[in-house]
Amino acid sequence: MSIAPAVRGRAATATAGRPPARRRRPLTVLLLCWLVVLFDGMDVNVYGAVMPRMLADPGLGLDPATAGTVGSWTTFGMLIGALAAGNLTDWTGRRPVIVGGTLLFSAGSVLCAAAPGAESFGLGRFVTGLGLGGVMPVCLSMVMEFAPGARAALTAGVLMTSYHVGGMLATGLGLTLAAGSGWRAVFWAGAVPALVAVPLLLWLLPESPAVLLAKGRTDRARQLADLYGLRLRHATAAPQAVGVRARWHAALALFRGPGRRATPLLWAASFCGLLLVYGVSTWLPQLMRAAGYGPTSSVAFLLVINAGGIVGMLIAGTVATRFGVARVSAVWFLLTAVGALLLSLRLPLPVTYVIVAVTGIWLFSAQVMVYATVPALYPAGQVSAGLGWATGVGRLGAVMGPALGGAVVAHGAQRWAFVIFAAAGLTGALAIHLAGRTPCPSDS
């Protein structure tokens, strides 16, 4: 269960009769989560960055079809990790889930580096996915909780930029470290999060006051709220139900309440969005190389599209605030479809770089804005469940994207991959547009 933030804004004073503790800055939480999500983005994108070299390694025994399957194992692991993260958070808290997820995806990278064949490499990527799946949503919940209320959206956008910085870092490793030391060295570098981030998390990252409050540890929650200058809401309601059964009932309620018409449309848009994100991240270098571009340029396209993603994250919120989130998300999906179709053409290298960059602007933030439409589609009590299930169903698209790309490449029809991506963009645009036109909860 996603626990709604129980803290917002700044506390005016310390509790009466108690000496004020030395304040800590909520910025620390953002910086730590930013670092973790950076490594998340690096691990997701590193497979695509080194895939051309892996396919050329006869000792590994990886072919395009198997490579697509392995990419789906990664995202399937992320799906399981994301679903498990809710129960683990209920039982242990957000801090242990972030630390444990970081250790797990680092261990998966080590398994990949040492893998003697394609099957054991796939197992390593599955383990990596298990760790990656829970880290992103829990980090997002943490920074939203510790951010001042007026800056919560901005803070979330800043956090999401780290994913694309991680993607650029993965590309840099693919262009430099892999070129000199082989593809295995890049996966050995994936152990760095366990060595660098985990000690910092154990030292500096606090537990979520919202989780502590839900678990009945009110004194500790109040102490942390005072320490970080947060306002703690009093727990007057009965404890919320947790566990698998509670989540299943919450999902059924999404089809019965005021947002019932929007639910399948929102899920379809999320499915298409994550199919695009993970399909493109996994296969872009190999697709561009098959289109006739050189090996260095093909991998560099992954860096460029992630650079575009950073720009998109910074501007999408501002544009959506003015014109409407669902409307802008639909336009972004359409522009992604146009970009994918243009990439199916053999154009001059500088033109292709520009197309890849602007496609990155639309592609990644289109998916984020799907999530941003949730508060407008459901009543307040269903927003958490609506967001959680849209994310979970979207993970199925993340599983399918790499597999589809692998199947198309295996049959030597690389241009059709871009057509499939364009079709996903068009479908996502239609779905989120129609979702945005459903009656608001207050109208029902």
Image (cartoon, rainbow, N blue to C red):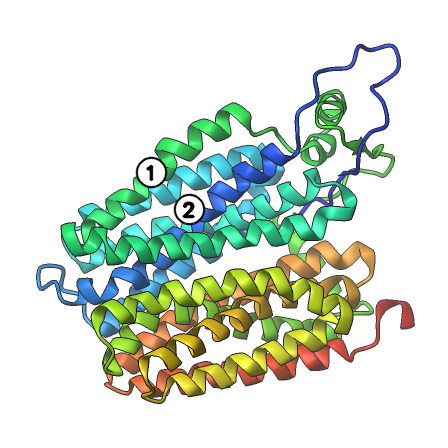
Q: Nearer the viewer, residue 160 or 357?
A: 357
Determine which quarter of the picture holds residue 53: bottom left
Report x, y in % for residue 90.
62, 39
Residue sitting at the far front: 350
| Contact between labelled residues 2 and 1, with CB atoms less than 8 Å apart | yes
Q: Secondary structure at mark 1?
A: helix
Q: Residue under circle 1?
A: 192
With 42 as the anchor, is 156 left or right in this view? Answer: right
Write down the residue under mark 2: 39
Is residue 215 visible to the viewer in this orientation of the structure? yes
Who's the residue at 59% across and 40% down the image?
30
336 displayed left or right of 303:
right
Amino acid marked by disc 1? Val
Residue placed at 34% from the left, 87% from the top? 347
User: Which amino acid type is marked by label 2?
Assistant: Phe
Residue at the left extreme of this rendering:
59
Labels 1 and 2: the sequence-earlier one: 2
